[in-house]
Every structure is written in C-alpha cells, then in structure tokens.
Image: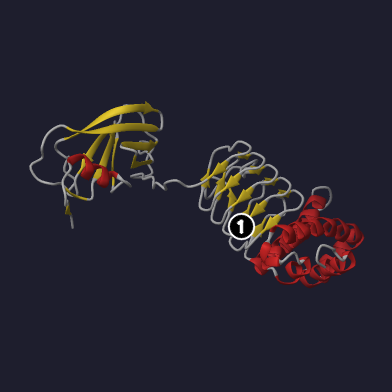
Amino acid sequence: MGGFIDMQQLHDELLTHLITTLSPAQMQELQAHLAPLVQTAAQAVAEDLIAYAYRDPASRGRAELILESYASFKAVLFYRLAHWVWSFHQQHNSAFCAIALKLSNQGKILSGAEIHPAAQIGRRFVLDHGYGTVIGETCEIGNDCYILCGVTLGARGIANNPDGKRHPRLGNNVEIGAGARVLGYVQIGDNVFISPACVITQDVPAGTKVKVVNQIQLQKNDESDHSNYLGAFALNERLHVVGEVNSSHKVTVLDADFHPLAGVLLEPTVKERHHLQFRLRHVASTGHPPRLPINLKVCGPEFEITLLSPPGLSAMVRHLLQVSPLIVGG
C-alpha cells in the first residue's frame, strides 16, 4: 500500500475479522448495520494506518506491512469495530454490548493490549509495541496520540472503583512512553510528552515533558486511618520527606541498628503540606563512624514509620561527617 490505502482490501479485511470472530447469530444481529459499520471503521483504520506508517521508522512507511503483521495494530483495528458497535448498543439493545466486548477481547487476544470499547479515541491513533497496554472504559484520547507498550490509562483504585469518570483524558498529540501509568480522571493537555515509567496522578498542562527523576517508594504501616504513606530522599544537600506529612511530624536519622545518629541535627528549611525539607548539620563528634545503611524514622501523633535507606541519605551523612570508610551493617 505504501502511502496509498486500498480501501476495498481494508473493507474485506474488516469483514473477514467480523465473520471469524462473531457467531452466526451475532452476525445476523449486525446484518442491518453491517455496511455502515465496515465503512465507518475502515475510514478510521485507514487514518490510523497512515499515521503509524508515517511515525514508525521500522515499518519503512509500509501501511500494508502494519496491517498484515503488526500485532499491536490488531488492538486498534478491533477497537474501531467494537467502539462503533458499543455506541450503537446505547441506542438499541444489549446484544450489541456483548458483540462489542467480544470484538474487543479478540483484539486483546491477538495483540496483548486491552482497549475497552467504550473508550473514546480520536483520529490517527498509534499503539506501538502495545503488549500490556490497558485503556479503560471512560478514557478520552484526542487526535494524533502515540502510545507504547505496558501503558496503563486506568483508575486510581484497584477494586471497587466508583462509577463515572475514573480514567484519564488526553489532549491532542500526546506521547506516552513504555511502562507509564496515568491513573484517575486527570487531564493531560495537548502536546504532552510522558517519558517511560512515569506514574501520573495529577493534571499535566499542555506543552509539558514529564520524566522520572527519582523513584521513591512510599511506605505505610497498616490499613488504619492513622497510618500515612511516606517516602524520603536526599538531593542537593537537603533531605526531603514527602507524602502524607506535615510540620507536626518528628523526623529522626537512624544508623543501621536503628539507633538515633548522634552528632547529626536536622534543621528544617521547608515546612509544607506533603513536603518537609531539612539541612543536616554536624553538631558533635560521634567518636566512631556510623554503620550503614542510614535509615529515617518519622513519627506522628498516632503512628511511627521507619524508612529504610532512603536514596542518597547514606552518602549525604558520610559527606557530612567526613568519615571514610563507613562500617556497613549486616
């Protein structure tokens, strides 16, 4: 095909997929709507194919190669069919819901990517190496978006998520790298680039590039209402405590044996909701080097969490105390 799409071949391809996926009874249910279904889906799929061929250098611009051999494109092809049937079921009977879900599931089987038929995806959509990608029911995706494998456009919770808008809304020309997760009803503006492995839970304004600078594990002791999710890291000669934290919380530096680190004082430099920042000061000689790794204890009115070896903290303490080598705890 190259840059030219043989629409008759594309119509035949879509019809073949319908016949091989659906039962005779389901095909009969669709019979009166078959011609507009195939025509509408073919127009959208043709634009998707051209966009994929143009933006993916590995295809060498060959749309027919993508249609015939790219597994990730099967998910998009079946989504286009399933979405049209799903939108039609809203106006008629529930049989169309089952047909739409069956088509969507076939796309998942062939590609490893799951796109709910109710999701709203704009024109010229590219799903590249899409294995493991999940696009939820209430997602809205604009035009000219490009998504890689392992991407989750999902809800913030796990089980028992509420009804209504619970999945992301993407603007136009959004690119999302492999393994990224965009969770909840967040707004991603136009021309946003989200690097691989990012976790997005807040709105991202148009024209923004997002990347992972430092991955911090947040910890929580238990499921009680009094326990908080907290994390910490050291960067640019400052200790940062982030998460469900406030200025009333007490922070203590511990050695590898979980004893308070003598001779080190935490001087607050920022006290904000969800962010405490400290400068570490060496106020007295400890007499012997502390044992690594250095840990951190955070205490609130009704909880206590020990954060094990926050990134950068051991190196900061070593530099502060100007001792070398440090003893490594077992």
From this viewpoint, is residue 95 visible? Answer: no
Q: Position of residue 325 (x, y in %)?
A: 16, 52
From this viewpoint, is residue 76 visible? Answer: yes
Q: Position of residue 28 (x, y in %)?
A: 87, 66
Mark 1 neighbour density, 10 Å: few (under 14) some (14–19) many (20 or more)? many
Query: In this orientation, which residue lies closer to the viewer: 222 or 260?
Result: 260
Query: In this orientation, which residue lies closer to the viewer: 70 or 96?
Result: 70
Please state, as top left, top right, bottom left or bottom right, where the N terminus lies in the image.
bottom right
Amino acid found under the numbered disc labelled 1:
Leu
Residue that carries the numbered disc 1 in the rendered image: 148
Q: Secondary structure at mark 1?
A: loop
Location of residue 329 (image quadrant): bottom left
Please state, as top left, top right, bottom left or bottom right, where the C terminus lies in the image.
bottom left
Q: Position of residue 155 (x, y in %)?
A: 57, 46
In this rendering, position of residue 262 left or right of residue 112: left
In this rendering, position of residue 303 left or right of residue 98: left
Identify whether 151 is placed above or below 206: below
- For the point 53% across and 53% down, the residue is 196
- For the point 74% across and 58% down, the residue is 54
Identify whether 25 is placed above or below 180: below
Query: In this orientation, which residue lies closer to the viewer: 22 or 169?
Result: 169
Identify whether 161 is placed above or below 62: above
Q: How many marks?
A: 1
Q: Position of residue 276 (x, y in %)?
A: 35, 32
In this rendering, position of residue 266 left or right of residue 158: left
Check the image and tell me how it is coloured.
Answer: secondary structure
